[in-house]
Image (cartoon, helix red, strand yellow):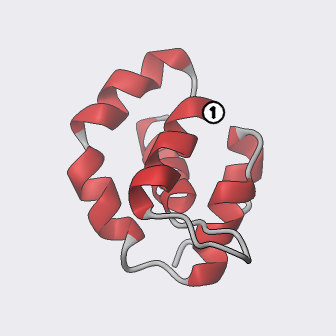
Amino acid sequence: MKKLMMFAFVATLAVGCSKKKASCDEIFEHTKSIAPAEMREMMEQKKESAIGKCEKMSDEAKQCAMDAKSMEDLQKCPRS
Protein backbone atom coordinates (compact mmCIF):
# COMPACT_ATOMS: atom_id res chain seq x y z
CA MET A 1 0.00 0.00 0.00
CA LYS A 2 2.83 2.40 0.85
CA LYS A 3 4.53 1.77 -2.50
CA LEU A 4 1.26 2.34 -4.31
CA MET A 5 0.68 5.58 -2.43
CA MET A 6 4.21 6.78 -3.11
CA PHE A 7 3.81 6.02 -6.81
CA ALA A 8 0.47 7.79 -6.83
CA PHE A 9 2.01 10.73 -5.07
CA VAL A 10 4.92 10.97 -7.47
CA ALA A 11 2.63 10.65 -10.46
CA THR A 12 0.44 13.38 -9.14
CA LEU A 13 3.38 15.61 -8.56
CA ALA A 14 4.03 15.53 -12.22
CA VAL A 15 1.08 17.38 -13.70
CA GLY A 16 0.46 20.78 -15.30
CA CYS A 17 -2.44 22.18 -17.31
CA SER A 18 -2.16 23.18 -20.96
CA LYS A 19 -2.28 26.94 -20.30
CA LYS A 20 -0.10 27.05 -17.20
CA LYS A 21 1.98 24.14 -16.05
CA ALA A 22 1.56 23.26 -12.41
CA SER A 23 4.62 23.29 -10.20
CA CYS A 24 5.72 20.10 -8.52
CA ASP A 25 4.66 21.64 -5.21
CA GLU A 26 1.14 22.15 -6.60
CA ILE A 27 1.11 18.60 -7.90
CA PHE A 28 2.23 17.32 -4.51
CA GLU A 29 -0.58 19.18 -2.76
CA HIS A 30 -3.14 17.91 -5.26
CA THR A 31 -1.95 14.33 -4.85
CA LYS A 32 -2.08 14.67 -1.09
CA SER A 33 -5.63 16.03 -1.32
CA ILE A 34 -6.91 12.93 -3.12
CA ALA A 35 -4.95 10.46 -0.99
CA PRO A 36 -6.60 8.63 1.90
CA ALA A 37 -6.35 10.62 5.13
CA GLU A 38 -4.17 7.99 6.80
CA MET A 39 -1.48 8.41 4.11
CA ARG A 40 -1.19 12.20 4.17
CA GLU A 41 1.21 12.47 7.10
CA MET A 42 3.56 9.91 5.55
CA MET A 43 3.42 11.80 2.26
CA GLU A 44 4.24 15.08 3.98
CA GLN A 45 7.33 13.49 5.55
CA LYS A 46 8.55 12.48 2.07
CA LYS A 47 7.64 15.72 0.32
CA GLU A 48 11.18 16.72 -0.71
CA SER A 49 11.87 13.31 -2.22
CA ALA A 50 8.54 13.30 -4.06
CA ILE A 51 9.13 16.77 -5.48
CA GLY A 52 12.59 15.71 -6.66
CA LYS A 53 11.04 12.76 -8.50
CA CYS A 54 8.33 14.99 -9.92
CA GLU A 55 10.90 17.34 -11.43
CA LYS A 56 12.22 14.44 -13.53
CA MET A 57 8.80 13.40 -14.85
CA SER A 58 7.45 14.12 -18.32
CA ASP A 59 4.96 16.91 -18.92
CA GLU A 60 2.42 14.22 -19.85
CA ALA A 61 2.85 12.43 -16.51
CA LYS A 62 2.59 15.72 -14.64
CA GLN A 63 -0.59 16.70 -16.48
CA CYS A 64 -2.13 13.30 -15.86
CA ALA A 65 -1.43 13.56 -12.14
CA MET A 66 -2.90 17.04 -11.94
CA ASP A 67 -6.02 15.90 -13.80
CA ALA A 68 -6.53 12.89 -11.51
CA LYS A 69 -9.73 13.01 -9.48
CA SER A 70 -9.00 9.85 -7.50
CA MET A 71 -6.15 7.54 -6.56
CA GLU A 72 -7.44 5.14 -9.22
CA ASP A 73 -7.02 7.87 -11.85
CA LEU A 74 -3.56 8.60 -10.54
CA GLN A 75 -2.51 4.96 -10.85
CA LYS A 76 -3.23 5.13 -14.59
CA CYS A 77 -0.71 7.94 -15.14
CA PRO A 78 2.67 7.36 -16.78
CA ARG A 79 5.47 6.81 -14.28
CA SER A 80 8.06 8.94 -15.98
Examine the rendered structure and indicate whether residue 37 appears above or below residue 20. above
Numbered-mark total: 1
Residue 45: where, in percent of width, then height?
23, 34
Would you say residue 78 is visible in this rendering? Answer: no
Q: Residue at x 54, y 60 (%)?
A: 11
Residue drawn at 63 percent across, 33 percent down: 34
Picture layout, residue 4 above or below residue 45:
below
Seen from the viewer's position, the closer of residues 14 and 6 is: 14
Relative side of 50 to 70, left or right: left
Q: Secondary structure at mark 1?
A: helix
Asked whether residue 22 appears in the rendered view, the answer is yes
**Quarter of the rendering containing residue 58:** bottom right
Answer above or below: position of 16 versus 13: below
In the rendered image, which quarter is residue 60 located in?
A: bottom right
What is the x, y in percent for residue 13?
48, 58
Percent across and percent down for residue 70 are 74, 39
Q: Position of residue 22 (x, y in %)?
A: 54, 64
Q: Residues within 10 Å of mark 1 (few under 14, many from 20)?
A: some
**For this rendering, which residue is in front, 50 or 75?**
50
Nearer to us in this view, 70 or 29:
29
Please name the amino acid that badge 1 sits on.
Ile
Residue 39, by quadrant, is top left
Q: Which residue is mark 1?
A: 34
Please, which residue is most extreme toward the top here? 38
Residue located farthest toward the front when viewing the structure as drawn: 19
**Above or below, 24 relative to 36:** below
Q: Is residue 10 left or right of residue 16?
A: left
Q: Is residue 3 left or right of residue 45?
A: right
Looking at the image, which residue is at 28% across and 46% down?
Answer: 47
